[in-house]
């Protein structure tokens, strides 16, 4: 009997697609410019890595704005956002500015199509208000505070779900903020004893995130974390602000160096294994100074896409510059 | 993090506490880090209640979540967010001045004007905003005489004869609101910053007393670079960064720190203290002095909500910084 059961399987592929399809397909990309191939949905964990000043927090903010906006007209996810600020760099005025830019763009598009003019203003205000009410923010100054905040966010999650609008995204900015503090914490030792070392703290964080994801069925909870580089790269740092002046020296580099720089191998991985196994997608962002302009480049490391996108940033999103 | 029996939760009877202790959980910290899968699906009602109570206690202790709508309301209720630097070209570069709740870092080689900018900002905030200023001096570069010249420049009039009546009093008042601290080592620095945070957090604000709105640490890198090297050094550096950010965000201060430069690749100087410190400030300004034209140039190296590489220039004169457009 067991062998027969094992051979017959639990469900057909068609049934499975019917079961999980509605919550994974049909979702608009959060940051359209960078997601032409990679589609993110509720069961993914995205890590955005890069040096300081390479637009990681900007990426997370744009994704959060897209998530807050309603489906109609804005192509948003119409869900709540939980933002854990471990860096202290969040600026609520910038969030308001981004939301207003999207709303104005939509209003202008509707006006050009010749639709209703008068309700637009109130509609815009209402949309802004509902979006602002769905964005939950907290600040943490240590790993323990972070874990406590994750534990206490369970109530918020359950409450939001009963109201109808559940949380769709959980943002952590940035996950490596307490790396040095946790590494220097004394290890209490013993296999069964929990201790505030880097491994212990990360294990607890991953556990809490998995628990929160379990509570957010069926839509799932997309986890996005930014990670700042702790170690500077061995090769010449392309994020050095004066690197634009040294372009002439660059041509002497060998092809091998160019390749490894592009594939991001020079970024030293310092997060513990439990975190590395938890993430499903990795995006590498870099910035380059070109005269007075800053150009950003993005590369998906997991899934490993070989092309590097270059883009600039304005209030309505990331704009790809044609290469 | 306290022991489990100290919050005085009723459902934590001695029997349940003994249960937890058998699993190695003696404090709230252990509870948070425990990887016992049975912790949440508890066996008995009493234990379930105990877990719920502990989670409630943790909830109350944590900062809690705020919606962005409420954050916006709080900011609008507080009012003035930008502190004038005293030099119009710098104000224009920073789009208003030093912003409350942010940490601004001035990076520059020696004699590039960092301390001059710090003193000018201190004078401007003390005089124009009528607020207290904390000046932490780690490299013995603070000069009260120079500060009085700068205040004289702000008050107006070229010398004592031309100044209006009462100007001397105003200068005296402003100088009284600038508190100077000499700290030369990392541990007294951390202790001082923590104490400042505690004092400002419990202070009840009265209408007549001036409130502290600016903290200057000149020069932050001179207390950090001697201890850098290895894990404990980096941990102390990160701790200092965290307490500075806490002071900025929780106590609504604008924090201004200075940093020196070290040699980078190709001979171009780069900011000291490495990659980890790069992520700490919200705004980074690079100062460079052009001795041939006697101008100082400030460039925005990093900003969390604005484009970078914008430029401003000013001149250092007897009465302070003079903007050059």
Image: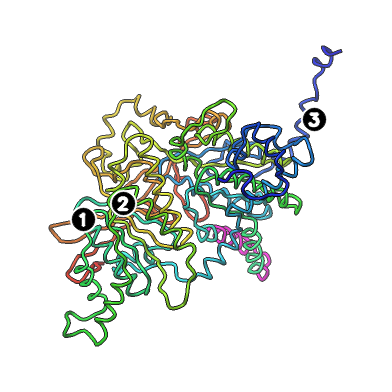
Magenta span has A105? Answer: yes
**Residue linked to disc 3:** A15
The CA span between labels 1 and 3 is: 69 Å
Answer few, some or many: residues within 10 Å of disc 3's Cα (few below 14, many 20 plus, some between 14 and 19). few
Q: Secondary structure at mark 3?
A: helix
Residue found farthest to the front: B14
Residue that appears at 25% across and 73% down: B151
Residue that appears at 37% across and 39% down: B234
- Chain identity of mark 1: B
Q: Nearer the viewer, mark 2 or mark 3?
A: 2
Do the residues marked 2 and 1 share a common chain?
A: yes
The reply to whether callout 1 and callout 3 are in contact (CB within 8 Å) is no
Mark earlier in primary sequence (2, 1): 1
Q: Nearer the viewer, mark 2 or mark 1?
A: 2
Label number found at residue B112: 1
Please tell me whether residue B187 is drawn above or below residue B44 in the rendered image: below
Q: Position of residue B194 (x, y in %)?
A: 42, 54
Tell me if A23 is positioned left or right of B110 in this view: right
Picture quarter containing residue B192?
Answer: bottom left
Q: Nearer the viewer, residue B66 or A300?
A: B66
Q: Nearer the viewer, residue B34 or B245?
A: B34
Residue that appears at 43% across and 78% down: B208
Q: Secondary structure at mark 1?
A: loop
The CA span between labels 2 and 1 is: 16 Å
Magenta span has A304? Answer: no
The quarter of the rendered structure image containing the N terminus of chain B is top right
The magenta segment is: A98-119
**Residue linked to disc 2:** B220
Q: Position of residue B184 (x, y in %)?
A: 27, 51
The quarter of the rendered structure image containing the C terminus of chain B is bottom left
Q: Nearer the viewer, residue A136 or A316?
A: A136
Tell me if A150 is positioned left or right of A263 in this view: right
């Amino acid at each position: 009997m067991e062998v027969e059961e094992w051979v017959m399987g639990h469900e057909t592929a068609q049934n499975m697609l019917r079961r999980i399809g509605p919550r994974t397909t049909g979702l608009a990309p959060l940051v359209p410019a960078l997601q032409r191939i990679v589609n993110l949905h509720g069961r993914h964990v995205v890590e955005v890595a890069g040096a300081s000043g390479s637009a990681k927090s900007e990426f997370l903010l744009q994704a959060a704005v897209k998530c807050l906006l309603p489906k109609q007209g804005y192509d948003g996810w119409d869900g709540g956002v939980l933002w854990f600020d471990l860096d202290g760099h969040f600026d609520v005025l910038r969030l308001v500015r981004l939301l207003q830019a999207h709303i104005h763009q939509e209003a202008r598009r509707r006006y050009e199509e010749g639709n209703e003019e008068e309700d637009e203003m109130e509609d815009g205000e209402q949309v802004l208000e509902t979006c602002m009410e769905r964005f939950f923010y907290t600040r943490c100054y240590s790993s323990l505070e972070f874990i406590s905040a994750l534990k206490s966010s369970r109530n918020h999650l359950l409450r939001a779900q009963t109201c109808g609008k559940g949380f769709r995204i959980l943002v952590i900015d940035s996950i490596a903020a307490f790396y040095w503090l946790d590494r220097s914490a004394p290890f209490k030792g013993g296999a069964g004893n929990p201790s505030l070392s880097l491994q212990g703290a990360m294990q607890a964080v991953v556990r809490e995130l998995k628990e929160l994801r379990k509570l957010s069925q069926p839509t799932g909870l997309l986890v996005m974390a930014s990670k700042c580089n702790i170690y500077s790269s061995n090769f010449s740092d392309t994020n050095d602000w004066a690197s634009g002046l040294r372009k002439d020296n660059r041509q002497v580099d060998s092809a091998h160096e160019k390749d490894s720089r592009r594939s991001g191998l020079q970024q030293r991985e310092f997060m513990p294994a439990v975190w590395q196994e938890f993430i499903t997608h990795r995006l590498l962002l870099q910035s380059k100074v070109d005269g007075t302009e800053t150009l950003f480049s993005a590369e998906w490391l997991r899934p490993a896409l070989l092309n590097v996108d270059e883009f600039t940033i304005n209030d309505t999103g990331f704009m790809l510059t044609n290469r | 993090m306290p022991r489990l029996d100290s919050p005085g939760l009723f459902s934590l009877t001695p029997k349940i506490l003994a249960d937890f202790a058998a699993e190695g959980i003696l404090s709230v910290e252990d509870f948070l880090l425990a990887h016992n899968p049975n912790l949440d699906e508890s066996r008995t009602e009493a234990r379930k209640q105990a877990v719920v109570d502990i989670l409630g206690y943790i909830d109350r202790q944590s900062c809690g979540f705020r919606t962005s709508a409420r954050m916006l309301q709080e900011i609008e209720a507080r009012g003035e967010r930008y502190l004038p630097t005293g030099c119009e070209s710098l104000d224009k570069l920073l789009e208003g001045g030093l912003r409350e709740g942010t940490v601004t870092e001035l990076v520059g080689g020696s004699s590039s004007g960092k301390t001059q900018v710090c003193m000018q900002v201190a004078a401007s905030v003390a005089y124009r905003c009528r607020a207290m200023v904390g000046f932490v001096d780690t490299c013995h570069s603070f000069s009260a005489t120079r500060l009085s010249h700068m205040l004289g420049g702000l008050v107006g009039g070229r010398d004592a004869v031309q100044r209006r009546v009462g100007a001397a009093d105003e200068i005296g008042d402003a100088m009284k609101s600038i508190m100077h601290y000499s700290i030369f080592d990392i541990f007294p620095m951390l202790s001082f910053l923590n104490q400042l945070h505690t004092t400002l957090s419990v202070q009840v604000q009265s209408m007549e007393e001036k409130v502290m709105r600016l903290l200057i640490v000149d020069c932050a890198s001179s207390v950090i670079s001697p201890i850098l090297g290895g894990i404990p050094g980096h941990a102390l550096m990160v701790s200092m960064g965290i307490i500075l950010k806490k002071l900025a965000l929780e106590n609504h201060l604008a924090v201004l720190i200075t940093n020196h430069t070290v040699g980078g690749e190709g001979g171009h100087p780069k900011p000291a203290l490495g990659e980890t410190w790069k992520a700490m400030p919200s705004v980074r300004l690079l100062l460079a002095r052009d001795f041939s034209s006697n101008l100082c140039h400030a460039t925005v190296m990093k900003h969390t909500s604005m484009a970078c590489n914008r430029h401003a220039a000013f001149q250092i004169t007897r009465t302070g910084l003079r903007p050059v457009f």
